[in-house]
Amino acid sequence: MTDVAVDVPAVAETPRVADGHVERPQQPAGPRERSDGAPSQATEQVVVVDYGGQYSQLIARRVRDCGVFSELVAHGAPLEEITRRNPRGIILSGGPASVYSENAPRLRRELLELGVPVLGICYGMQLLAHELGGRVEEAAVGEFGRTDLRVAEPGVLLAGTPTEQTCWMSHRDTVFEAPPGFAALAGSGVSPVAAMEDATRRIFGIQFHPEVVHTPYGQEILMRFLSEICGCECTWSPASIVEEQIARIRAQVGDGRVICGLSGGVDSSVAALLVHRAVGDQLTCVFVDHGLMRKDEGVQVIGAFRDTFNVPLVAVDASERFLARLRGVTEPEAKRKAIGAEFIDVFSEEATKLAGAGAKARYLVQGTLYSDVIESGAGAGAAKIKSHHNVGGLPEDLDFDLVEPLRMLFKDEVRAVGTELGLPDRLVWRQPFPGPGLAIRVVGGEATKERLDVLREADHILQEEIRRAGLYRELWQSFCVLPDVRTVGVQGDERTYGYVVVIRAVTSDDAMTADWARLPYDLLERVASRMMGELREVNRVVLDITSKPPGTIEWE
């Protein structure tokens, strides 16, 4: 397909590289304005072109860790999607295809003609080699995992790294000859050319993955590309965008009224605080207590927002309504639908009350994250909403414009912004919690008040002991499950017939995979002893040691 001609904005001059020396140009006079929610200082940014690699998002994250804002752009996106960002550099990601496959993503030469440095990683390097006259072939043996790398000539990209080092490989095709004009910098047992560069044209390629922790010098290599080659100042941080996002929200909202469905999770909490910092009492938060939260969470949310931050807050105790809606419901998907439908009813009623009191909202705050944007395939432009999953799927007669101050941030960046805003650690570092709450952790049976209360108390004991042991932040999630099972026990010389509580604790980086947490035995003993001693209904505690895959983190 041929790209449609577009007006390409001038690209900021980047450093010239000659004989390993980097000459820095003068910085542009000022940042270009962006209208898609990205930080304005993100004009000094690097674009990651996604060729479908499993680590593509991680590349963008690692670039941000270096202090440079980055965005992920699909390889088939119009060229304007890249040029309008005025990038200081471009990174071509890895991908599962072979450059010789019929439907493999191709490298557009226009990317090499934008006047900015280009770094190809794995498949990205193979594309560069294939397109520019090198030789790429399938190796007799693929390289997967930790690999020894030998640096023959460090050049500009690998300068300062050891001659012998390890890296993380994941490929079968290999660059056997670098293109004309390129220097082969390093190789491995399988890859004769595992790194290459044309310093004059500022085109670089590495076969290994610098973005993963298994490449010890990977972050150093990325930093050198960003700072020494692209000339980035590396001053971006999520905390640095607070004031800018506040100004952006004010410009969008004006004197309009805003409503936010506050769940108490870190995303909605940080989004709400940003909007309140921007427009004050124009924002009203609606907190619906469905009776399915963990112990004291509703009190914590109300205390933080109404009492500490003085955010206008409507707190609705709808626990009896949700319990009535869940009566007789045992199937997990049916529970989710019942809870979502009831939330719609409650939220709609409160929005109508606000409108009747002269506070009709035009704008709806959502805690949409950059990972949501990427996974949905959406761009970073403005959006109009009539239904949205973050608030349970609002009905069509509730018509809002979206305010999404977090849509360019990853989860850990949102936590940094929350800390900057003064959000209490208990809310900033709150572990992921399912939207339907404890109802789907009552497994195989009806979520009655009795069962929810037992589960809530058991979960409270677990969390209290994990926090006391200093392990809370080390775990991705830790929680209890209450199966619809009773077992025989002996307590106080009497036969009992009580509930089984399952302890589930996992470690993970992204929830795509997870390993069961090796909690200390003495901690598990204290937790089990407390549960069976303090909860008369419980006479057995078990530990789930299933990883993901094959299991999932939640049971339902």
Image: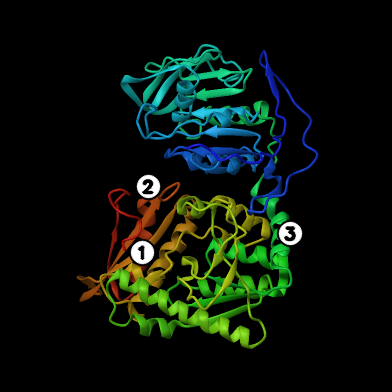
Q: Amino acid at mark 2?
A: Thr
Q: Quadrant of the C terminus?
A: bottom left
For marks 1 and 3, the one nearer the N-term is 3
Looking at the picture, how far across and down is residue 504, in whole percent? Answer: 35, 58
Provide the secondary structure element on which disc 3 rests. helix
Q: Relative to residue 27, is residue 366 depicted above or below? A: below
Q: Residue at x 37, y 24 (%)?
A: 173
**How many residues crowd around disc 1 within 10 Å: few (fewer than 14), some, or many (20 or more)?**
many
Q: Residue at x 40, y 70 (%)?
A: 436
Provide the secondary structure element on which disc 2 rests. loop
Q: Is residue 280 left or right of residue 194?
A: right
Q: Relative to residue 285, is residue 143 depicted above or below? A: above
Q: Is residue 121 left or right of residue 313?
A: left
Q: Is residue 494 visible?
A: no
**How many residues crowd around disc 3 within 10 Å: few (fewer than 14), some, or many (20 or more)?**
some
Q: Relative to residue 454, is residue 216 depicted above or below? A: above
**In the depicted view, which residue is nearer to us: 485 or 192?**
192
Mark 2 or mark 3, which is nearer to you?
3
- What residue would you read off at disc 1? 480
Q: Which mark is residue 513?
A: 2
Q: Residue at x 70, y 48 (%)?
A: 40
